[in-house]
Amino acid sequence: MRILWLANVPSPYRVDFFNELGKQCELTVLFEKKTSDERDKSWLNYSFQTFKGIFLRGKSINTDSAICPEVVSYVKGKTYDHVVVTNYYSPTGIIAVFYMRAHHIPYWIEGDGGFAKIGNGIKSRMKTFMISGSKGCFSTSKAHDEYYLAYGATKENIHRYPFTSIKKDDLINASALVADGKLVIREKLGMTEKRIILSVGRFTYDRGYGKGFDILMKVAESLRDDYGFYIVGDQPTQEFIEWKEKENLNNVNYISYISKEELSYYYAASDGFVLLTRGDAWGLVINEAMVYGLPIITTPYCIAGTELVEDYVNGFLVDLDDVHNIVEKVKNITHSDNNYRYSLASREKIENYTIEQMVNTHMTIFSRK
């Protein structure tokens, strides 16, 4: 089976997926750019092991997109069993889709997730043109299904797949690390608090407000005794540095620019994971936290949360406007009996969300079409 895949940049989790997919088919991936301008150097540490990765020539227009008319030369007159477009929102993807529709070349649409916000503008009409004309759409969730339906897809042409950044080996390694014991890991990390709450995200995403760090700070103000809050990501903005100093929040810790391996120790040391996002098309950090058996608190604006988190089973979906309730839910997930039960549920739920299963699902769908 020969597959052509159109993408914007070689993000680490996608490269892992392509390397696994390339074991089962002849895969060529076209990239618009070598990396996203807003990501650190770790995003350049990729290796194309089982597939052919090609960087298109073009003009960069923003952090992770470019205009690459050269894409036409790869879809024109080539024989592929399947063509998948994940960058259908970018000029390069639009050029490719317009060409394929004009020349009756079937193509698939895939995305990480999305919320249905249909409008009457040219952007909405463009999405409808591309999605409604596709052979099928790969969806991550119920909300993503509704997004595709809003833009002209039919129910029978929407296919679910388990979206993830986790490999089977990650499950094994996480189990081994957790087995070392939280107290041992906390001692290595210099954690002294009785209960540890972790959040992961970039302050450069809407100045920290997009990830809800402002709400998390208010929660930390209410839980000064025995609770340590660790926010792992990039450099905090001056506003959040001053907030911590002004309110004397010694229980809030900013951890900047650490590797994936270093981050694994923070997951293993924590009692719960909180992501108070105001909008995430998915939120892969939810998957990662669940691998370490962490109970989850997040919002209805995080699709990973709506798919993977059940109230009183492995965590909670919360209202951002109700800080008091969030505080109570943090207490709930860190209560010893609840914590153990939620932890087991999180781990059980995430075991089918591996890159290997993600690939197998795609190959099954391709073979049927």
Image: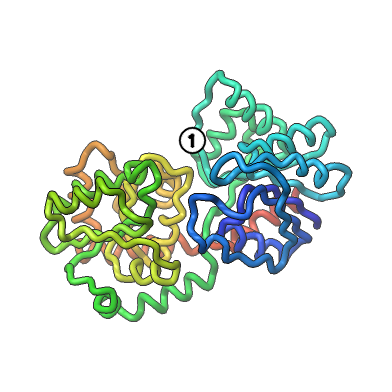
Inspect this view and state whether residue 25 appears: yes
Q: In the displayed structure, would residue 201 be above or below residue 51?
A: above
Residue most extreme to the top: 120
Disc 1 target residue: 115
| Rendered image coloring scheme | rainbow
Q: In the displayed structure, would residue 300 be above or below residue 262?
A: above
Image quarter where the N terminus lies is bottom right
Q: In the rendering, at what x and y percent does residue 124 appear?
A: 58, 25
Quarter of the view holding residue 25: bottom right
Q: Residue at (75%, 58%) from the top-left corner?
A: 27
In depth, the one of 124 and 24 nearer the eye is 124
Q: Secondary structure at mark 1?
A: loop
In depth, the one of 342 and 74 nearer the eye is 74
In depth, the one of 86 and 244 nearer the eye is 244
Image check: 142 left or right of 266? right
Image check: 216 left or right of 167? left
Q: In the rendering, at what x and y percent does residue 155 appear?
A: 62, 35
Q: In the rendering, at what x and y percent does residue 192 appear?
A: 18, 71
Q: Residue at (24%, 74%) from the top-left corner?
A: 190
Image check: 122 left or right of 181? right
Q: In the displayed structure, would residue 262 be above or below residue 202?
A: below
Q: Residue at (68%, 39%) from the top-left corner?
A: 67
Q: Residue at (80%, 55%) from the top-left corner?
A: 2
Quarter of the view holding residue 105: top right
Disc 1 residue crowd, few under 14, some 14–19, many 20+, Cα 10 Å = some
Q: In the rendering, at what x and y percent does residue 18 appear?
A: 66, 60
Q: In the displayed structure, would residue 181 be above or below residue 218?
A: below
Inspect this view and state whether residue 137 appears: no
Query: At label 1, which amino acid type do we have?
Result: Phe
